[in-house]
Amino acid sequence: MSYRFADRTKMFKTSAIREIGGIIQRKGSDVISFAGGNPHEPYFPTAQIQQAFEKVFASGNASLQYGMTTGYMPLRGAISERVKSKGIQAKPEDILLTTGSQQSIDLLSRVMLSPGDVVLTENPTFLAATQAFESYEAKLVAVEGDKDGMYPEDLEQKLKQHQPKFVYVVPTFSNPDGKVWSEERRAALLELAYKYDTLILEDDPYGDIQFHEEEKYTPIAAMDERKTQVVYTSSFSKTVVPSLRIGWVTGPEAVIKYMSQIKEAADLMSSPLDQQALYYLLRDMDLDAHIRMLSKNYYQHMSIMRDYLNTLDENLVSWVEPKGGMFIWAKVHESINATELLKQVLEHGVAFIPGGPFFVENPQENTLRLNFTHPNPEKIKIGMERLTAAFKQSVKLG
Amino acid sequence: MSYRFADRTKMFKTSAIREIGGIIQRKGSDVISFAGGNPHEPYFPTAQIQQAFEKVFASGNASLQYGMTTGYMPLRGAISERVKSKGIQAKPEDILLTTGSQQSIDLLSRVMLSPGDVVLTENPTFLAATQAFESYEAKLVAVEGDKDGMYPEDLEQKLKQHQPKFVYVVPTFSNPDGKVWSEERRAALLELAYKYDTLILEDDPYGDIQFHEEEKYTPIAAMDERKTQVVYTSSFSKTVVPSLRIGWVTGPEAVIKYMSQIKEAADLMSSPLDQQALYYLLRDMDLDAHIRMLSKNYYQHMSIMRDYLNTLDENLVSWVEPKGGMFIWAKVHESINATELLKQVLEHGVAFIPGGPFFVENPQENTLRLNFTHPNPEKIKIGMERLTAAFKQSVKLG
């Protein structure tokens, strides 16, 4: 039989990164992988999570019944309290719980994007977000920028030209390139969003993993005093554990209302059991202390990786030290293709992700992303020994 | 600011049932509600679920990491084994785990439906499914039928006329009207689907709650020996607990592949933690014995309701005794509007759901749905005392 699929399936792509993941996996478990984006398992607060689940079960059978589409209200209340420290004022009823921030991105796309609508993005940007946008047949347009964020001039020109439905940004320790937008660029984006009546989707899954406690990175959502322009999403996948699959989103009431309505059609609700457990966890555990521990340890992971990269010739590899998050973004010499380089380093038993697929336009094939959160410090050392050796050899060969 | 939402949001409706739910809730907790669709909490296997979670936590921190988009493979294997008893041959890799069967319905819609595409449905049918179809701007066309299922003649005529993307059916203890399709009508639907190259979406969340063990209701998916035509979805919400939010879907490889791909954009994955716990539960608990207990008890619930309805004049209320599932579907005299009737019975402290909103076309406003699974037998007695009294009074007033 020939299946008559929806037009939007023409936009579905085989993910280059999933394919590369498959290649790395087939090389076997001896490969030390800097390719993924997973947190470090030994840091998981498993005992506390188990206790939180015990509290849910002890609260009675009603806790295992259907819940609300918008999510478990006490958890929405706890999130509302937590984000005040970031300067975000969100009432519990303006917070929608989702199955991870990926679902927040998808639901906003679903209520905003008709075929042909434009979304402005950074370049490179988070790949899975662009897949969600494209699945609704949206057109992606990259805004030029530098390490401080999008250039306001180019942004304004593209806002005028394309009248995009929203601008998608990961301003704090972005994936893939780990950068932090300056305050000025954040403010400029918000001003232009007001001026051109465009929403901003601020994706902030990494903002809590911060290496320099004294520095402050104000979410754009906190600057939006009118509370009209920014849809802000975050998640507990990086700070608690990924397997709970709990994200959340807040923004203008009219937008969140539509997103809640479409979530009902999408999956009725996310796991009320996991939401209740997370509520007890936030109530009874010092999550801020846990996040400080994570940030301190991940800084150590990153430092090991950085020190090895520092042994390499500047002409061979350049990068900016990240101030938080999970990734180092590096550029090798223009003559080197990172996908080819990956094949060579795999022979040395180490892996990264080529940066090309993260670009919306004009892919830079000499870029690569290194994850430092998943392997332990000892593995990072071994992996970086292999990687730096492979890099040096590739130059000799090249 | 004026938000420029996607065209599809014009199709979003305020759910009449959600509104009615709000009215019932505002009447307070003294109301005995037959309006919902929830299972009975005291029957939940909470201790076993808690043990299953303990096994996940004991298996180590890696169990709290990200999982696969398609779901936890051992659980897919366990489902593959379980459905063999229904005659369904599904390889583990052809089973996609979802956040409840609502997500299965939504993902199939997303890969199949372009604006203007037609879906054929029963009339009445499951409301939340039609909301998913309409959110993709599909057109719903009702096929005529009776207590045994769709009329093949009307079905064929509408397959010819509309070339629908799929036919949506709940053939075993449907929601709202509790009916069971005959084997002949199932076979006729499948033959016509082959002939007109159309998919069938078989939604089977209630099939396990069966009151007459000796009777067999063959899923249409089990009849589809070519394995080309039927997308079959079910869930553990009614047989284990709703709060795990685990459903699953199987069907032609090409369709499941696209659904998996779009699930990655939709929410990356459902809770791997809940999936692992369900795997241990299925491994270590006698779920079939549990389902027999549920079926026996729900039959008792239904019988109480039925016996009260039997005390009423046939001209006042007519219904067919359900052979399983969770609902009795009743018709009152044509002169009575069930929404008006609801207002009257609420004054007596009891509630149901009017049937009108479940119709895709030609709503029968004198129908209503009674849920017998959620309240306990004692409450059902009190509620039915109130309901039958209110019914009798409404006739006198009418």
Image: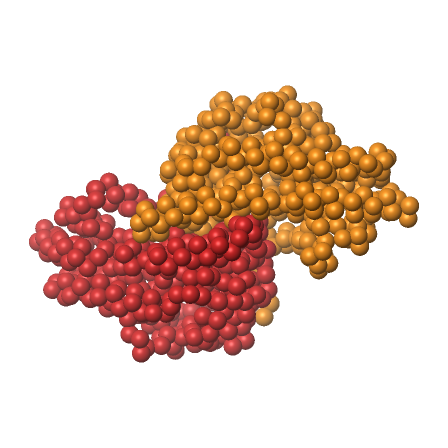
Chain colours: A orange, B red
**Left or right for A77, reference A340:** left
Q: Nearer the viewer, residue B164 or A362?
A: A362
Identify whether B144 is placed above or below B132.
below
Q: Position of residue B190 (x, y in %)?
A: 46, 73
Q: Position of residue A226 (x, y in %)?
A: 48, 23
Is residue B28 shown above or below B307?
A: above
Residue A324 falls left or right of residue B251: right
Considering every residue shown, the one lying at the far front of the view is: A378
Residue plotted at (69% across, 24% down): A153
List x then y, in percent, for residue B107. Answer: 51, 55
The reply to whether residue A349 is visible in this rendering is: yes
Query: On the picture, is B282 further left or further right than B34?
Result: right
**Quarter occupied by residue B206:** bottom left
Quadrant for the N terminus of chain A in the image: bottom right
User: Residue A388 falls in which quadrant of the image?
Assistant: top right
Q: In the image, what residue occupies the spot 76% across and 35% down?
A: A307
Which residue sits at x=28%, y=71%? Answer: B211
In the image, residue B11 sits, relative to residue B70, either above or below, namely above
User: What residue is at 50 percent from the left and 32 percent from the top?
Assistant: A288
> Residue A20: percent from the left, percent from the top?
71, 53
> Which residue is at the far left?
B396
